[in-house]
Image (spheres, grey):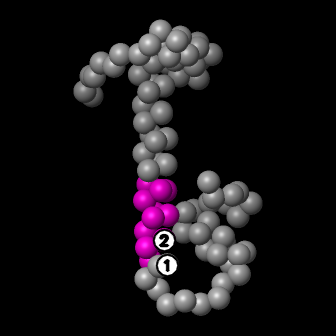
Amino acid sequence: MVTISISLPAIMKEWVDAQTADGRYSDASDFMRDLIRERQEEAEKTAMLRALFVEGRSSPSRKVNRDELLTSIKNRLGLPHGMAAE
């Protein structure tokens, strides 16, 4: 594993410390790795939505109702059907 150093304002450091104090994360590094994983997942979903947008813009027009559209998007993103695409 590679080590990096980051600088944080005191208030952010206190917040990170609070996140690790409850035992959910073993230390600040564990917390930061989790934040990075979440951001990576978010970036992948954003890229997929952009690709869907481009695909939609280049495909022939057809009428699709809102529910069909949302279901299709949720399926492609792997979201449960009761969950809104954010």
Q: Decide if residue 17 is in sight here.
A: no
On the image, the x and y values in percent for residue 38 come to 49, 41
On the image, the x and y values in percent for residue 57 come to 47, 79
Q: Do the residues labelled 1 and 2 touch (CB within 8 Å)?
A: yes
On the image, the x and y values in percent for residue 79 come to 62, 60
Dot 1 crowding, Cα within 10 Å, few <14, some 14–19, many 20+: few
Numbered disc 1: secondary structure: helix
Numbered disc 2: secondary structure: helix
Q: Which residue range is magenta in the image?
A: 44-55
- Give me the disc on residue 53: 2
Closest to the observer, 82 or 66: 66
Dot 2 crowding, Cα within 10 Å, few <14, some 14–19, many 20+: few
On the image, the x and y values in percent for residue 54 come to 43, 73
Q: Decide if residue 58 is in sight here.
A: yes
Which residue is label 1 attached to? 56
Q: Give yes or no for residue 5 being in the magenta stretch.
A: no
Residue placed at 55% from the left, 63% from the top?
A: 77
